[in-house]
Image (spheres, rainbow, N blue to C red):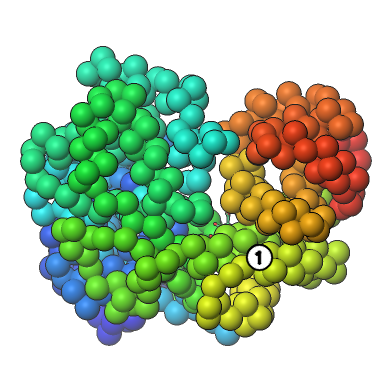
Amino acid sequence: MSTELQSAATSAVDLPQLNRSLRPAAKAPIRIVHLGLGAFHRSHQAWYTHQAGDAADWGIAAFTGRRPDAARALAEQDGLYTVVERADSGDSFTVVSSIVEALDGADMQRLADLVAAPATAVVTLTITEAAYRLGADGQLDRTAADVVADLALLESGSGTPTTPLGRLVLALAARRAAATGPLAVVCCDNLSNNGTVAHNALVGMAGAWDQGLAEWINATISLVSTSVDRITPRTTEADIAAVEAGCGYRDNSPVVAEPFSNWVLSGDFPAGRPRWEDAGAVFVDDIEPYENRKLWLLNGAHSLLAYAGQLRGHSTVAQALADPLCLQAIEKFWDEAEANLTGTDLQIPAYRAALLERFSNARIAHHLAQIAMDGSTKLRMRAVPVLQAERAAGRSGVAAGLMIAAWMDYSAAAAEVQDPLAAGVAAANRLSGAERIQALLKLVDPALAGDSGVVNLIEDLCGTFGQPAGSR
Ligand code: CS2
């Protein structure tokens, strides 16, 4: 923390507000546009940009998704916010100044203007896995209700799309019209091959509206794949109080994250990029092994803990990890995943050991309910590839199957399931026995649903973690 900020410390009754008077340097020019302004963007990409040696040249204009609230709160602080790095041993605070404009995602005009601006070189995305509206075939699901609505709106030429994909397609059309040239779109959502997924989604959406735009995107926009990592729970009132006590100012939008962070990127930046490597980002040619390591070992274990842990009555990752039944399930899943992770230098034993330490950081209250959301999409990246690989190798895939079974039990027990396929999940849960398993599996991966061996395996595994009384 700078001495300037330290000297801002004053009595708890009359704290100064974090605002432009505390901005450490002049605002950087906007060269990055971000979609999905939330806690993770602020603890990760914005944090890397803030730490880059050339940060003074790279300002971010960040747009929210569904609600404008996060942009409003941040705009009141001139885009400034505190990153609280929460270690077992205590907190450390950094004021991040890379976000120079925080905007409502529905401000389509500003988005189009900024994406079309010649200075803009990079568009980053944290729009959630589910927002890519991937069908089980890996392509854009053109039948999804919000996709249909946005396509009709694009066709009509008036109104603001509601999906981030629809908004980005419209903004890219503005860049094409302005002839301001290529840029990089960097996907920072937890999907395997996320650059390709984003490419398919964008081209799919654009192509259903204007084939010429789809071809232009194909030829001009570089889709960069990344593996992103930093555990970032939702901010709470207690976090705001911790910043007041630690820094002596009021910050209504701090973000708490673990000290660990990781960013692996692969792809071209035709219009340049910040020197993120100064903050530890790594650029590689082949990202797949890193993606799989992170998606299977970290995110896979997270999903397993989210479903098994809640069925066992736990609320946070650290609590679930302390339950021997949950711990045993993730160790077994990791063994299966590890058998299918290829790639040199992945250092799996050290990675697993570090994960156990990160998950057990009890000062980070990472809620299982937050991780449990959007299960049908997440399991496709986290459980299905391991299950398929194990079965292809002639083994049962029982530990990956257990993650899917735990999701099924959780989906029947939970008061409300937040999922892009929530209606299908509810309908499937009205069935019973193998029919129910099959219907739920179909939402995750239709091929698996047609494999009676897998259906039987998962049916046998259901109930492993128990179910709250009266849940069915
Ligand atoms: C989590 C991730 O909510 C989830 O699905 O698994 O957000 C996880 O915390 C991050 O990927 C960690 O980098």
Q: Residue at x 39, y 40 (%)?
A: 200
Where's residue 223, x and y in %?
32, 51
Where's residue 344, x and y in %?
53, 78
Q: 192 above or below 344?
A: above
Helix, strand or loop for disc 1: loop
Q: Residue at x 38, y 71 (%)?
A: 284
Q: Is residue 405 left or right of residue 100?
A: right
Q: Residue at x 9, y 50 (%)?
A: 118
Q: Is residue 249 left or right of residue 388?
A: left
Relative to the observer, which residue lies in front, 177 or 389? 389
Where's residue 343, x and y in %?
54, 73
Q: Is residue 431 left or right of residue 372?
A: right
Q: 194 above or below 211?
A: below
The crowd level at tag 1 (other Cα within 10 Å; few <14, some 14-19, many 20+) is: some
Report the amino acid beneath label 1.
Answer: Asn
Relative to the observer, which residue lies in front, 190 or 310? 190
Q: 1 above or below 153?
A: below
Q: Which residue is mark 1?
A: 340
Ligand 1 contact, mark 1 (Cβ < 8 Å): no
Q: Residue at x 22, y 18 (%)?
A: 157
Q: Could you tell me how many numbered marks the image carries?
A: 1
Q: 279 above or below 410?
A: below
Residue 208 appears in the rendering: yes
Taking the image as four quarters, which one is ligand 1 found in?
bottom right
Q: Quadrant of residue 419?
A: top right
Q: Quadrant of residue 358?
A: bottom right
Relative to the observer, which residue lies in front, 193 or 326? 193
In the picture, which quadrant includes the C terminus? top right
Relative to the observer, which residue lies in front, 374 or 237? 374
